[in-house]
Image (spheres, rainbow, N blue to C red):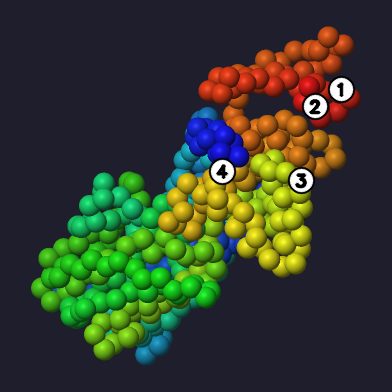
Amino acid sequence: MKRVLVIFLSVLTITVFPQPLRKHPPAENRILTDHKIIRSDSSVVLVYSFALRNDMLVFTKENGAYKAEYKIEVELVSEINSQIERFNYYDIMKVSSYSETISEAYREGLIKIPLKMKRFGAKPLFTDIYSHNEIKLPEFRYNTDSTKNVFFLIKDGNNGNMKGEWDYLNRGRYIPFTSKPVHLIIPDNKATKGPFTAYAFSRNDTSTLQLEEFYDEGIDIDSTSNGLRLKAYKSIGSHILLVKSINEKLPEGECTIRISSGQDTNFFRSQFRVFWFNKPQTLMNPEFASKLIIIMDTEDKADSIKRAVDEDDAGALFQYWKKYDPTPITVFNELMAEFYFRADEANNRYSTIRGNDGVLTDRGKIFVKYGEPTKIDRGSSPIGKMSEIWYYASINKSFRFVDRTGAGNYELQ
């Protein structure tokens, strides 16, 4: 099995194709929203941010490119005098290819609203301009006297320098289940003194998190050409707390992040959901996912894992993959993810008229095991049947497939 692991790690690039049979997730996972109140020395600002998936929009073709238009509106209603204020974000999106229009990539934006109201309710609304489709986004209420538990998820970046500026990762209350580190920024206008301790609670597990503190600094956020950006600025009496790699030990599912300061055990406490946004479709069904183990291992091993999964022990599948995990210090298993991403692609490419079975065909199994071929020669066999020869230069192997029945099910010779 060690040889198979080396082969997997040697193939890093896989061509991505559209997945027209993939079911869309519910709208709340395709339009992610968040809202914060940020205090500075002279103002109070409501920051309403959103992340919108490309496949949520209706595109039209124009001059060889694809174009979409949308609007986000936030209506504020005062709970004191019923005063109404409306704020809009309008955007035109252009992409060069059809595949980008159905991409699961997120486009981020924000509306910064200087607050005059002390207590208010907010009613956000999404509108697709071309289809006139409207979606009511989650409503919320605010009292500006309270800014407790304000937080920002940020991406890993700046070549390891975690001070000064950060890329904001707007995923609402979701922490992405990913191999990339995700950090947490917490602004504190009161400059609370430590010592601080931070914990992540998930299922039956508790892990301690690392912290870094920046005193006499406040936080602001702006939209840039590369996304949303947090910036620290000099602010006497303010304080920024950075909690590092909060996702490193967190499995999928509900979790709680808690930070204590001295005797205040709930200086910060917030619930999140760890969510695998681009989870492979073939991994959605643990029973089917365990069946695919036969590509890597023996039929007996695949059957034993499937039996465990049938007995409601889905963890048996993840436990099997732990021995192939190239980064065992984290919960996310890159090799497992790559395997099932390839399985998805095999289903898209090689499924037969029988249904969504491409990963179980001979070509599908070879593709999952070895990745994209270096070269493919297409022709016919000595008996006139269509054939393909796949070459893998890095491992000096080739595989011949023949379509004996003419139905598209190429068999390995």
Element under disc 2 = strand
> Are there few (<14), some (14-19), or many (20+) residues within 10 Å of tag 4?
some
- Cα separation, mark 4 vs mark 3, equals 21 Å
Q: Residue at x 44, y 47 (%)?
A: 92
Using the image, determine if residue 182 lies above or below residue 365: below
Element under disc 4 = helix
Q: Looking at the image, is mark 4 or mark 2 earlier in the sequence?
A: 4
Instruction: Tell us which disc is closer to us: 3 or 1.
Output: 3
Tags 3 and 1 touching, CB below 8 Å: no
Left or right: 27 with respect to 154? right
Kind of residue sitting beneath label 3: Glu
Question: Can you identify the residue that label 4 sits on?
Answer: 338
Tags 1 and 2 touching, CB below 8 Å: yes
- Cα separation, mark 3 vs mark 2, equals 19 Å
Mark sitting on residue 299: 3
Q: Looking at the image, is mark 3 or mark 2 earlier in the sequence?
A: 3
Question: Can you identify the residue that label 2 sits on?
Answer: 411
Q: Nearer the viewer, residue 177 or 216?
A: 177
Locate residue 3, reporting x and y percent: 57, 34
Using the image, determine if residue 182 lies above or below residue 139: above
Tags 4 and 1 touching, CB below 8 Å: no
Q: Residue at x 77, y 35 (%)?
A: 361
